[in-house]
Image (spheres, rainbow, N blue to C red):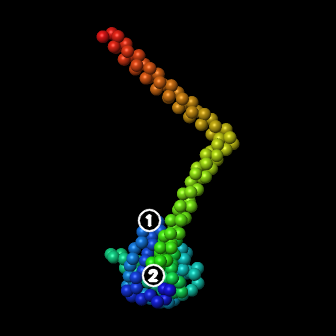
Amino acid sequence: MFQGIQQGTSLYILYRNEPRVVSGNIVNVTGPKPPKASQGNPMAAFGGLVMEATVSTGNDTTSFEIPVNATTANYPDKGIFISTDRTAVVREVESMANMSKQILSQVPMHQKMVTECDNLLLELNPEKQKEVQTAKEMADLKGELADMKRMLSAFLANKDKKEE
């Protein structure tokens, strides 16, 4: 639990959005005290006592409001998860990987959904049908024009060879 942390205690910081893990050391701890009540503060909803911990990670220092009676803390607004236990960080990384794998496995279903919704929108919206039809006709005309250019080029190339 965090209540045993003190200056020099190692702490792991998982940056969920990147993802990467940085280890740091606590350089200052104050508390315990009630959490600061503010919007976006996940510890305010926690309801227990917290400690203010300043963590040094090389050249950077970051302050966290840490729940006293927990072993991990999650800061979704910052995309950060912290723990003094490396195993907890490993479990969290595994959870993130599993969630991403699950999302990736659903990509084909969502691609099909987008296609089917686009088709439904075409059926339900006559203006969209006209736009799609006009775009298709333009693409067909461009293709025919390109074919005519190739034929004309081939004709002129053959004509030039015959004249020589």
Among all residues in the image, which is located at the extreme left?
164
Residue pushed farthest top? 163
Q: Residue furthest right?
A: 124
Q: Quadrant of residue 56?
A: bottom left
In the picture, measured across the screen, residue 8 lies left or right of residue 41, that is left
Q: Which residue is mark 1?
A: 18
Residue 156 at x, y = what percent?
A: 38, 16
The residue at the point 45 percent across, 72 percent down is 14
- Up-down: is 1 above or below 122? below
Which residue is the site of mark 2?
A: 84
Instruction: Tell me the amino acid under the disc marked 1.
Output: Glu
Question: Looking at the rendering, in which quadrant would you find the C terminus?
Answer: top left
**Residue type highlighted by circle 2:** Thr
- Report x, y in % for residue 18: 44, 65
SS label for mark 2 = loop
Vertically, is 74 above or below 27? above
Residue 73 x/y as whole percent: 51, 78
